[in-house]
Amino acid sequence: MNSTAQDEITAYVFAVRAALGDLPEAQRDELLEDLTEHLTEVMADGEGSLIDRLGSPEAYAAELRGTAPFVGGFPDPPRSANPFAELREQFVPQLREHVYPLLRVVDERLGKLLGYPRARDFFVLLRPAWWVVRGYLAAMVVAVMLDGTGQPIGLLPRIGGSDVVALLLLGAAVLGSIWLGRRSLRLRWWPRLALYLGSFVLVMVALTGFVEADSSTRDSYYSDVNYDNPYSGVEDVFVYDEQGRLIDNARLFDQNGEPIHLGSAYCYDEYGNLLEESDAGVYPYCPEKAPFRMPGAAPKASASVEPTTTPSAKGR
């Protein structure tokens, strides 16, 4: 035991003795006979000062007065009101006895595969990289929460589509994560637990984003493309000459000389009865259903082109 702890015990005993000064000396000596040894055990078993563990010397002396008929017994330190502290005191010894030895074996065997005495020696080297990644993930989460454009933010934590804001936010988050990482080992139990839980949430968010990105990439080759045919509703074709006269038996061809087939070659009346069946690709199928017709203009028959003979051919 160091001198500071011994001085604290001596001062505590002296204060308790002073608080019991009204008792007979023989009774007071009996009450304080084993107090020094008891305080030494308390200091060795727990954390904090004696006042934190046992209360003030005056309060402790008052409890000793209650045990005056049973000289030699000392009140135990008050149980902590923190339920998590009680759980820790209950389960930590079991973890140290059953789980820690197994983890130590795994640590050593995995370390040999990585080329280090222990695996944690290797993971310690990765801490700075994790601090940077944690800052990036935190910045992305903040950007997703604050961005109200509804557009994908990309690989940078853009807010409102601004690259400048993204770089500033990313730099601040990474520097903050590094600052917090360098001081995490000095945090108390509760702040450290909160830090670990926050890091776990960030890892889950990163894994979810990775799975969604992977799924989107793999499914991109099978995305539906809506090929909307503007002529899908065409039932018939009506061809007019320069004078507005309907041309019968017209044919349409594309740039390659292939005939163009549109609509249906069946003609029905207004009651749905089949009137006639026309040749496919010869328009119109139903001339009487022409959308408009010039007054007094009769349909113009398709012109037939006769082959011409050359003078040389006539002389043969």
Image (cartoon, grey):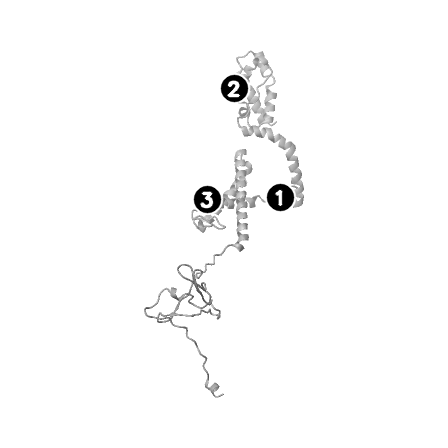
Q: State if disc 2 and disc 1 touch (CB < 8 Å).
A: no
Residue 304 position within the rendered picture, expressed as x and y whole percent measured from the top left: 43, 76
Q: Quick one: which residue is furthest to the left in this view?
A: 295
Residue 252 position within the rendered picture, expressed as x and y whole percent measured from the top left: 44, 69
Quote the CA–CA distance across marks 1 and 2: 51 Å
Q: Earlier in the sequence, mark 2 or mark 3?
A: 2
Residue 59, numbered label: 2
Q: What's the amino acid at mark 2?
A: Ala
Q: Quadrant of residue 14?
A: top right
User: Is the residue 75 above or below the residue 144 in the image?
Assistant: above
Q: State if disc 1 and disc 3 touch (CB < 8 Å).
A: no
Quote the CA–CA distance across marks 3 and 1: 35 Å
Residue that mark 1 sits on = 122
The residue drawn where x is 55% and y is 16% is: 64
Q: Is residue 103 left or right of residue 273?
A: right
Q: Quadrant of the N terminus?
A: top right
Nearest to the eye among marks 1 and 2: give it: 1
The residue drawn where x is 56% and y is 28% is: 86
Mark 3 is surrounded, within 10 Å at the Cα level, by few (under 14), some (14 to 19) or many (20 or more) other residues, namely: few
Q: What's the amino acid at mark 3?
A: Met
Secondary structure category for the residue under label 1:
helix
User: Is the residue 251 above or below the residue 157 in the image?
Assistant: below
Is residue 63 in sight in this rendering?
Answer: yes
Query: In front: 181, or 81?
Result: 81
Residue that mark 3 sits on = 145
Q: Quadrant of residue 273?
A: bottom left
Q: Earlier in the sequence, mark 1 or mark 2?
A: 2
